[in-house]
Structures are given as structure tokens and as C-alpha cells.
């Protein structure tokens, strides 16, 4: 039995869950998210908690059991607290600024890079070298942060580029040089 899949999800104050067949909708103070449950997985409410179970021990049901529970747990957290990813920009002349709701990055290219946030994602700048990605969908927040990081990933020699806050970049020695 999946250790993660069998743990019940407790609902915080102000979060409502509606289960209609294979569709689970979670509503909270920050918004609403829905998820289509795979066949072979059952989601039900018991004593104010969400319980996820599977029909049998087939391989695809075992794989989907813990994943479904984790996705539902992230949905509950997202609509009640939200998710946030912080990116640091390191490098001389590298900076970020907001133009309306769009993020404009100066990353040493011949042109500025403009990022338009997808639906449900909010971008913010805290100083010229810190970008904050917020939203209620954990997957969308992570993907947007990864897309922004992908414009200039940290390079291993000087460490310049865009990295996640507190990300450790393994540094390489430069040329041995000389004789």
C-alpha cells in the first residue's frame, strides 16, 4: 500500500471540496482548482478529510495512487495559502523590471527578454535582481519559474545567470593557464 496515498488530507478553514464522479473541484479563498481522477482511483470525503484509495494492486493504479493524493494535497494548499518561487539574477548588468503585468529581463543579450505571465500566475520584482513567481497551481508556478530560469541558466565558471533562491551551483575551475 502506498504510504503517501493512504494518508488522509485534512482541509483547512474555508476550503470546500466537491466530488462529482471523476472530477474533484477544490475552492478556497485564493481561487478554485479542478482535477480529473484517473480510472481505478477513488476519492471520497470522510469526516471532513479527503481519502484516496485504489481499486486493485495493478501497476498503473499503484503509480497513480500516491500521485493523485499529492496533487489533491497541493490543490488544497494552493487555494488556501498559494505557492511562491523566488529567482535570483546574478551578473553584471543583469536586471529585471516590470512593465504592466509583463516581466522584462536584461540578460546580456542584444535585446530585452519579455515574459508574459500565463493565466493564474502573478510575477513580481523585489529589487532589480529578484523575481517572485506566485500562484495557486504548484505545477504552473514551477513551470513558469523554470521557463524564466531557462533564458539564462547559471553557468559553472562564474555562476552568472538566473537561479532559484538558495540553489547551489557547482563551480568548475577555470583554465590552468600559464606554463
Image: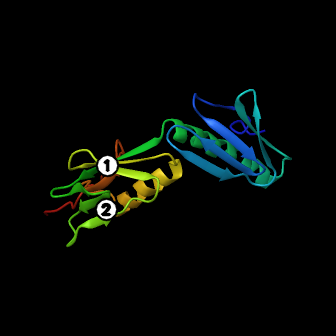
Q: Residue at x 76, y 52 (%)?
A: 22
**Front-most of residues 160 and 44:** 44
Q: Residue at x 54, y 40 (%)?
A: 79
| Residue topped by disc 2 | 152
Q: Which mark is residue 178?
A: none
For mark 2, does the 10 Å Cα neighbourhood hold few (<14), some (14 to 19), or many (20 or more) residues? Answer: some
State which quadrant residue 11 falls in. Answer: top right
Q: Which mark is residue 124?
A: 1
Q: CA distance from mark 2 to mark 1?
A: 18 Å
Residue 169 visible, this orientation:
no
Nearer to us of marks 2 and 1 is 1
Residue 106 visible, this orientation:
yes
Give the left or right position of residue 86, taking residue 72 as reference: left
Q: Secondary structure at mark 1?
A: strand
Residue 127: percent from the left, percent from the top?
A: 21, 45
Task: Name the colour scheme.
Answer: rainbow
**Front-most of residues 179 and 122:** 122
Q: Residue at x 36, y 62 (%)?
A: 116
Label pair 2/1, CB-CB below 8 angstroms = no
List the single residue furthest toward the left: 178
Q: Residue at x 51, y 37 (%)?
A: 29
Residue 85: percent from the left, percent from the top?
A: 40, 45
Amino acid at each position: 500500500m502506498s504510504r503517501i496515498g493512504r494518508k488522509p488530507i485534512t482541509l483547512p478553514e474555508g476550503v470546500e471540496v466537491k466530488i462529482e464522479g471523476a472530477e474533484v473541484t477544490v475552492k478556497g479563498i485564493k481561487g478554485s482548482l479542478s482535477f480529473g481522477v484517473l480510472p481505478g482511483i477513488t476519492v471520497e470525503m470522510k469526516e471532513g478529510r479527503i481519502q484516496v484509495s485504489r481499486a486493485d494492486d495493478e501497476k498503473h493504479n499503484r503509480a497513480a495512487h500516491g500521485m493523485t493524493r499529492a496533487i489533491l494535497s497541493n490543490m488544497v494548499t494552493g487555494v488556501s495559502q498559494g505557492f511562491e518561487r523566488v529567482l535570483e539574477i546574478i551578473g553584471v548588468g543583469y536586471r529585471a523590471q516590470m512593465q504592466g503585468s509583463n516581466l522584462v529581463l536584461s540578460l546580456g543579450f542584444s535585446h530585452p527578454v519579455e515574459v508574459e505571465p500565463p493565466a493564474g500566475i502573478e510575477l513580481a520584482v523585489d529589487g532589480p535582481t529578484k523575481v517572485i513567481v506566485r500562484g495557486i497551481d504548484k505545477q504552473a508556478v514551477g513551470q513558469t519559474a523554470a521557463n524564466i530560469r531557462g533564458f539564462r541558466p547559471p553557468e559553472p565558471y562564474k555562476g552568472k545567470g538566473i537561479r532559484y533562491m538558495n540553489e547551489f551551483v557547482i563551480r568548475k575551475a577555470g583554465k590552468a593557464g600559464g606554463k
